Image: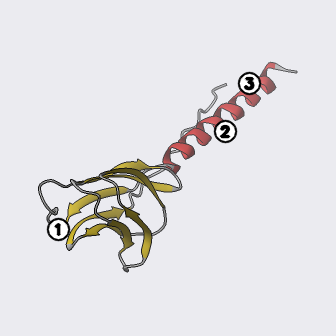
């Protein structure tokens, strides 16, 4: 095989790999997620923490931590911007931690609502997509 053909094959492979890597990096650009608490936490002896952990290509990931002084029944719900219930779970323990994965779709807002014994706590996350440019850089072989 001539040196020119070997050089051309190597150049084609290098260009393909570089294009593939750049495409893979931009394909997993995360959506922007921001949070806002929309209600006062019930009672100082109770603790509710809801945190956005990040996302994958398929899910938004959140961690929910609930602590209460008694074993009262709490309901954790997740609603979208149209008030469709995406998740619901009853909690009857003093401490509760859960990793919640919400499928990535076209949600604009996710509302986390914890209710129980006449009290409620909610936290809203807004979701916006970020558009990024793709740059394809190819090496031009000189003669």
* Sequence-earlier tag: 1 or 2: 2
User: Residue at horizontal 25%, vertical 59%?
Assistant: 35
Quote the CA–CA distance across marks 2 and 3.
14 Å
The label nearer to you, 2 versus 3, is: 2
Element marked by disc 1: loop
The label nearer to you, 1 versus 2, is: 1
Quote the CA–CA distance across marks 3 and 1.
65 Å
Query: Answer yes or no: do the residues labelled 2 and 3 have beta carbons within 8 Å?
Result: no
Q: Which residue is mark 3?
A: 7
**Residue 92 found in image quarter:** bottom left
* Sequence-earlier tag: 3 or 1: 3
**Residue 6 found in image quarter:** top right
Q: Nearer the viewer, residue 19 or 139?
A: 19
The local crowd at label 1, few if under 14, some if 14 to 19, many if 20 or more residues have their Cα within 10 Å, is: few
Quote the CA–CA distance across marks 1 and 2.
52 Å
Q: Nearer the viewer, residue 95 or 88?
A: 95
User: Residue at horizontal 69%, vertical 30%?
Assistant: 11
User: Residue at horizontal 40%, vertical 51%?
Assistant: 98
Q: Which residue is mark 2?
A: 16
In screen coordinates, is 42 left or right of 105?
left
Please determine whether, in this image, residue 69 is positioned above or below residue 6: below
* Sequence-earlier tag: 2 or 3: 3
Q: Which residue is mark 1?
A: 39
The local crowd at label 3, few if under 14, some if 14 to 19, many if 20 or more residues have their Cα within 10 Å, is: few
Quarter of the figure with the N terminus: top right
Element marked by disc 3: helix
Q: Nearer the viewer, residue 68 or 103?
A: 68
């Amino acid at each position: 095989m001539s040196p020119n053909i070997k050089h051309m094959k190597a150049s084609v492979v290098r260009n393909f790999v570089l294009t593939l890597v750049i495409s893979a990096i931009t394909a997993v650009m995360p959506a922007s997620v921001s949070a806002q608490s929309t209600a006062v936490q019930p009672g100082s002896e109770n603790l509710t923490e809801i945190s956005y952990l990040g996302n994958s290509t398929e899910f938004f990931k959140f961690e929910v931590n609930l602590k209460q002084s008694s074993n009262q029944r709490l309901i954790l719900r997740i609603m979208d911007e149209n008030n469709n219930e995406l998740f619901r779970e009853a909690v009857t323990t003093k401490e509760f931690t859960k990793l919640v994965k919400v499928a990535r779709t076209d949600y604009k807002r996710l509302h986390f609502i914890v209710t129980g014994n006449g009290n409620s706590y909610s936290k809203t996350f807004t979701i916006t997509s970020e558009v990024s440019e793709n740059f394809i850089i190819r090496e031009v072989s000189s003669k």
